[in-house]
Amino acid sequence: MTESNWTAIADEYEITDAELAALDDDGDGDEGAPVSLPVLAVVGRPNVGKSTLVNRILGRREAVVQDVPGVTRDRVAYDANWNGRRFTLVDTGGWEPDAQGRAAAIANQARYAMSVADAVLLVVDARVGITDTDAAVARVLQRGGKPVVVAANKVDDTKGEADVAELWRLGLGEPWPVSALHGRGSGDLLDKVLEVLPEAPAEGRFGTGGPRRVALVGRPNVGKSSLLNALTKEDRAVVDSVAGTTVDPVDSLVELGDEVWRFVDTAGLRKKVTFSSGAEYYASLRTAAAIEAAEVAVVLLDASEPLSEQDQRVITGVVEAGRALVIAFNKWDLMDEDRRELLDREIDRDLQRVRWAPRINVSARTRRAVDKLAPMLHTALEGWEQRIPTGRLNSWMSELVAAHPHPVRGGKQTRILFATQAGSKPPRFVLFTTGPVDVAYQRYIERRLREDFGFVGTPIQISVRIKEKRKRR
């Protein structure tokens, strides 16, 4: 369809100049790659109020908080902003240097966070004073060579300030009194943090742009944290045989396919948020937010078990959020021939609506095929970012409608005047029509778009704008 055709249609129907101008705009209008930010790690022993302080700094409830030591079990990254300066805030599990078992795994996360951070915020309970654990943390920080700010937490009034002086003995400089619960002193603390935090990460770890964001999602106990550990080749996330070990989303920088990706290991989605409570309720919100913040989601399914309603709900959440999608079948090492036949039938029956999503069979335990995940992610992201020039789209649409017209309904046949791709990430198409378009016909258009242009790994959104004929005077 030529520009003169569009102009003629616009003159005949009530189409605005802005809508007509969109037909000449083949730019994507999307934001560029995210920039890399300096990293501040928040560390300290259990239950000193680290997550409460993180929420205070962020100005919103992000970190899961309960009056129970050890609710934060992995290291969790958030984007923060103070006085126009943006930085990444990493919340960590409480550190007990002589911890055993799961507590030892949590301690390793805190040590790692300190090693990769550009600066460290050490949180100490001013009312308790310096414990053996605080002193041990201080010694590690002194050897680490990173800038450190000491937050003397739980100083709720002027009477508590007398307890702050003792914290000079940590040997990390001036302690800053703060009440994470009430916000007292938080501004002064953040001013000090910005003094020691560099403008950019050390050595430009992520190059000129930030790493692509990947949400790792699935129902509880499908092996999300195990897969993350297999990708990083280290015990990055706390893994336990008990379902629900991961509470907060956990950000990991993973080198895969000769580039760095930002993986977020999320809490397993158990039930609808409406019926959740306590820490699980907020963890569900964090998981949904992680999907929203990601560019592509890897939905992990347990290949050794039948596909469940929970699996379907996770996939639906990704599709409705408009994110690129890769489906990974984990625990492939547990498969036998009988289960493979059953799985093929389940895929044909239950995953028909997302046949466009790349699929990969992996084993987190044996690391089977985990290195092949990067090409799948690239394929999905390319489909997610794909655009069709408006002229080509309308020529294609004209041929499509001529070969397969919209069905007649109530004695009338809807006419598609023209179409435009309104955006990408995900691809969004707008049909300008003379009447309603059947849902089945919209599905037909989507199927043909995929057959003729690809759009692998991405949902496609189609909307309809009905246009009336102009009234002539």
Image (spheres, helix red, strand yellow):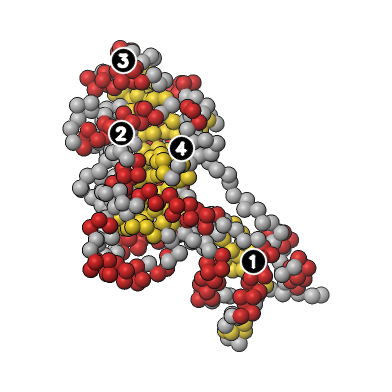
Q: Which residue is mark 1?
A: 393
Give the label on residue 170, or none: 3
| Disc 3 crowd, CA 10 A, few/some/many (<14, 14-19, 20+) | some
Give the label on residue 451, or none: none
Query: Do the residues bearing badges 2 and 4 touch, measured as CB atoms within 8 Å?
Result: no
- Three-letter amino acid code at the position of disc 3: Leu
Query: Do the residues bearing badges 3 and 2 touch, measured as CB atoms within 8 Å?
Result: no
**Alpha-carbon span between mark 1 and mark 3:** 66 Å
- Three-letter amino acid code at the position of disc 2: Gln
Q: In terms of image quadrants, where is residue 247?
A: top left
Quarter of the C terminus within the rendering: bottom right
**Alpha-carbon span between mark 4 and mark 1:** 38 Å
Nearer the observer: mark 3 or 2; the answer is 2
Of the residues under marks 3 and 2, which one precedes in the sequence?
A: 2
Side of 438 where 256 appears, left or right? left
Q: In terms of image quadrants, where is residue 54?
A: top left
Give the label on residue 79, or none: 4
Of the residues under marks 4 and 3, which one precedes in the sequence?
A: 4
